[in-house]
Amino acid sequence: MQRLILVDESVIIRKVGRRILSDLGYLVTEAEDIGAAMALCKGGLPAVLIVDSCLDGSADFIRDVRALPDGKSVKIFYCLVESKLKTMMQGKRAGADDFLLKPFDREILTKMFSDQSRSAA
């Protein structure tokens, strides 16, 4: 089972994401801010990280994760409310692998994550 950390200040987003991603076979841990997420990552890097772009320091956090030992192996999704090129480029430059638009639902997460869960198993 792959470990996934979902970083978002919204309790609802974390709750919905946790339920759906757990059903897809991930061991989901939640963090409501960058500080809590970094503490979790320092305790052990996840296979997948979903980071809300609206959080203060989100791009720096991605860079910091990439700088950790084995940080380059983490699949990082930068979560956006809308497709803004400037925000997407910030995430990409920081080291994000892909983007995820929110609010997300079961269909979107299943499409994005079911293949990854199977391929790593």
Image: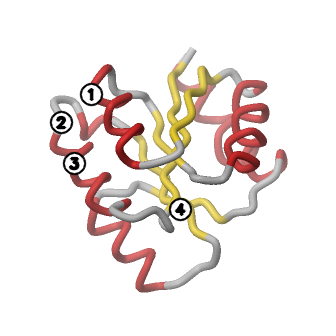
Pointers 2 and 3 in contact (CB under 8 A)? yes
Disc 4 marks which residue?
99
Which of the two discs, 4 and 2, labels the residue nearer the N terminus? 2
Q: Which of marks 3 and 4 is in front?
A: 3
Left or right of 20, for residue 56 = left
Left or right of 121, for residue 42 = left
Q: Is label 2 in a helix, a strand or a loop?
A: loop
Which of the two discs, 1 and 4, labels the residue nearer the N terminus? 1
C-alpha span from label 4 to label 2? 21 Å
Name the kind of residue labelled 4 in the image: Phe
In terms of image quadrants, where is residue 66? top left
Q: Is label 1 in a helix, a strand or a loop?
A: helix
Q: In this view, does 49 lie above or below 21?
A: below
C-alpha span from label 3 to label 1? 10 Å
Disc 3 marks which residue?
64
Which of the two discs, 3 and 1, labels the residue nearer the N terminus? 1
Disc 2 marks which residue?
68
Q: How crowded is mark 1: few (under 14 residues within 10 Å), some or many (20 or more)?
A: few
Q: Is label 3 in a helix, a strand or a loop?
A: helix
Disc 1 marks which residue?
42
Name the kind of residue labelled 1 in the image: Lys
Position in image of residue 15 (x %, y %): 74, 39
Give the number of marks.
4
Position in image of residue 70 (x %, y %): 21, 30
Q: Is label 4 in a helix, a strand or a loop?
A: strand
Q: Which residue is drawn at 37% across and 60% down?
A: 58
Q: Nearer the viewer, mark 1 or mark 4?
A: 1
C-alpha span from label 3 to label 4? 18 Å
